[in-house]
Image (cartoon, helix red, strand yellow):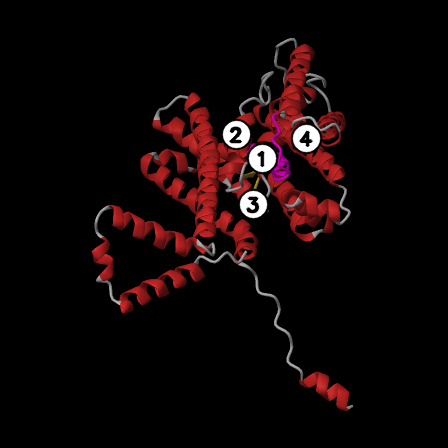
Amino acid sequence: MADNAGKAAEPRQRARAWTKREHKGRKKPLSRLWIVVISTALLIVAGALIAPSTVSVGALQLMLPFFAILAVASIGQHLVIQQRGLDLSVAGIMSFSAVIVSALPSTEAGIGTTLAFVALALAMGVGIGAANGILVALLRVNSLVTTLGMNSLMLGITMWVTSGFSQQVPPSLNKFGIGKFFEVPLTIYVMLVLGAIAIFLLEKTTLGRRFIATSVNPDAAIAVGIPLDFYRVATYALAGFCYAAAGVLLAGFVASPTVFSGVPYLLATVAAVVVGGNPIGGGVRGSVAATIVGALFLTYLGQLVLAVGFETSAQNIVQAVIIIASVGIVEVGRRIRFEWIRFKFWVTSPDVEFRIRTTFTRSMARLGLSKLLDNVSSDTRTRMHTAYLRLKRRLEITE
């Protein structure tokens, strides 16, 4: 009893406090989401002042399906970028999936036949994505080279199947593509379901936590036995599924998709991830919700650019500027952090005070100002030394 009482009287050990870097990494996805939400809201307010027609009910209902299509494709790109890759097969997979549901079935196909071709398009996306993943993860081929080559291959197959001519989708798919429920396009509900599934899997499941571990710290993931290659192949397969689903939604909405209908989404998916605040090089915990809001930002921005009077090509220019600026800001910030760490190491090194004092004394002697140093009181020297020690403590590297 006495031993138990003694143990109970012992103070509990305090839990280890979060370091500044851990705390920042833990809060980044939420703050990233708030930043892009506020930016999108400000853009819509500015658009309402510049071009009021862009916030009318009709304009928003016309914009929402394109937002949903871009968001679905951007979810796939988000997963790949999280794994420190970049998928350039978006255009080919989207274009070919649109062709599968438009050129292959007859224009009078029923619901059952249409669903079969939709399933075939989705399976095609998973298969092509898995092939990308195998080449990248198992054969160690660069992701840019792999996906760019696969994109060219899929666009070539699309051209060969269609002979360059667009076809009509079955009436049931077109009805779904332009359909609404409570005045909200059905494509929005599809996007919400896919986005909710992606967020739930990443945030609430063991698979999602392992996925985050493999993207943030691959070496540590390998050390604890997580199959890194499996997760990378699965990532590209899921990305291919998202691209194919976006292609099906696009075909259903426009009714007669062009042969290269997915090409505009190649740059837009990367820009949506970047606008969402997710670094293009991956390596940190990302936010799918922020990527979806980033897709809304880009879609409305494109509509606003057209409403103001610019041509469609201006959208591509804006997207390219966003991507280049984001990469440049990341690199500049990384360089500033590196130089700051170098400066802290220099200031906190043991002999730096001696070197500073020696260099200053020699410089004053060469300038003939040595007598000024003799007039400095001991109190002033003590204050300067104390200030230097305080600076060293503030700059001490603790992480």
Q: CA distance from mark 4 to mark 3?
A: 19 Å
Q: Residue at x 46, y 27 (%)?
A: 320
Q: In the visual, does 188 lie left or right of 224?
A: left
Residue contact between numbered discs 2 and 4, judged by CB atoms under 8 Å: no
Q: Tag 2 or tag 3, which sits nearer the N-term?
A: 2
Give the image location of residue 67, x and y in percent: 53, 35
Q: Residue at x 60, y 33 (%)?
A: 73
Q: CA distance from mark 3 to mark 2?
A: 16 Å
Q: In the visual, does 53 lie left or right of 372?
A: right
Is 324 included in the stretch rendered in magenta? no
Q: Kindly tell me whether residue 98 is visible in this rendering.
A: no
As shown in the figure, which amino acid type bears the numbered disc 1?
A: Ser
As shown in the figure, which amino acid type bears the numbered disc 2?
A: Ala
Mark 2 element type: helix
Quarter holding the C terminus is: bottom right
Label 1 environment density (alpha carbons within 10 Å; few <14, some 14–19, many ≥20): many
Residue under numbered circle 4: 240
Q: Tag 1 or tag 3, which sits nearer the N-term?
A: 1
Mark 1 element type: helix
Q: Quadrant of residue 214?
A: top right
Q: Residue at x 47, y 54 (%)?
A: 349
Relative depth, front residue between 328 and 396 = 396
Q: Tag 1 or tag 2, which sits nearer the N-term?
A: 1
Residue under numbered circle 1: 74
Q: In the visual, does 337 lie left or right of 130?
A: left
Q: Tag 4 or tag 2, which sits nearer the N-term?
A: 4
Give the image location of residue 341, x and y in percent: 47, 48
Q: Tag 3 or tag 4, which sits nearer the N-term?
A: 4
Give the image location of residue 197, x and y in percent: 67, 45
Mark drawn on residue 268:
2
